[in-house]
């Protein structure tokens, strides 16, 4: 469904992660864990298309769509759960 292929991120001489390969498949639930500064938020920004990797690519299966909500959950306090979920998809929330 979503494939990460040879994904690398480097800030100057600092390599955050190098040649990450994984596939997220339908029907599974995934968690991204790691120490502070390990690159979890950066990885999610790349998957969401908010940031470009140094190298590699993210491939979303044709015909599939992905929705992403901002990490700041307080932005959604004034909205219902349904409104909040729809905000994660620009096409549905237009």
Image: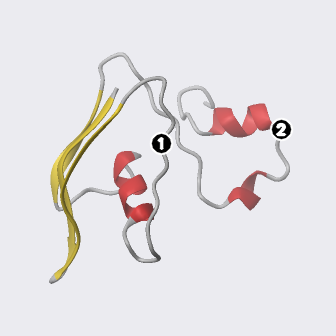
Q: Is residue 51 above or below residue 12?
A: above
> x, y percentage for residue 31?
49, 49
Position of residue 3 in the picture relative to residue 35 (left or right) = left
Within 10 Å of the Cα at label 1, are there few (<14), some (14-19), or many (20+) other Cα atoms?
A: few
Of residues 59 and 19, which is closer to you in this image? 19
SS label for mark 2: loop
Q: Residue most toward the top?
A: 63
Please name the residue that numbered disc 1 is placed on.
30
| Quadrant assignment, res 61 | top left
Q: Which of marks 2 and 1 is in front?
A: 1
| Quadrant assignment, res 60 | top left
Residue under the point 78% across and 37% down: 81
Position of residue 86 in the picture relative to residue 2 (left or right) = right
Residue under the point 15% across and 83% down: 13
Of residues 15 and 32, which is closer to you in this image? 32
Looking at marks 2 and 1 on the same chain, the residue that comes earlier in the sequence is marked by: 1
Q: In this view, does 51 lie above or below 89?
A: below
Of residues 18 and 71, which is closer to you in this image? 18
Q: Are marks 2 and 1 in contact (CB under 8 Å)?
A: no
Give the spatial CA distance, label 2 vs label 1: 25 Å
Position of residue 20 in the picture relative to residue 29 (left or right) = left
Within 10 Å of the Cα at label 2, are there few (<14), some (14-19), or many (20+) other Cα atoms?
A: few
> x, y percentage for residue 14?
20, 81
Numbered circles on residues, count: 2
Please name the residue that numbered disc 2 is placed on.
80
Residue under the point 59% across and 39% down: 88
> x, y percentage for residue 10?
20, 72
Residue under the point 61% across and 30% down: 94
């Amino acid at each position: 469904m979503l494939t990460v292929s040879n994904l690398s991120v480097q800030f100057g001489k600092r390599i955050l992660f190098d040649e990450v390969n994984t596939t997220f498949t339908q029907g599974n639930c995934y968690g991204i864990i790691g120490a502070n500064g390990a690159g979890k938020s950066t990885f999610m920004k790349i998957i969401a298309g908010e940031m470009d990797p140094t190298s590699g690519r993210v491939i979303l299966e044709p015909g599939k769509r992905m929705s992403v909500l901002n990490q700041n959950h307080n932005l959604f306090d004034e909205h219902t759960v349904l409104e909040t979920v729809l905000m994660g998809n620009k096409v549905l929330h237009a």
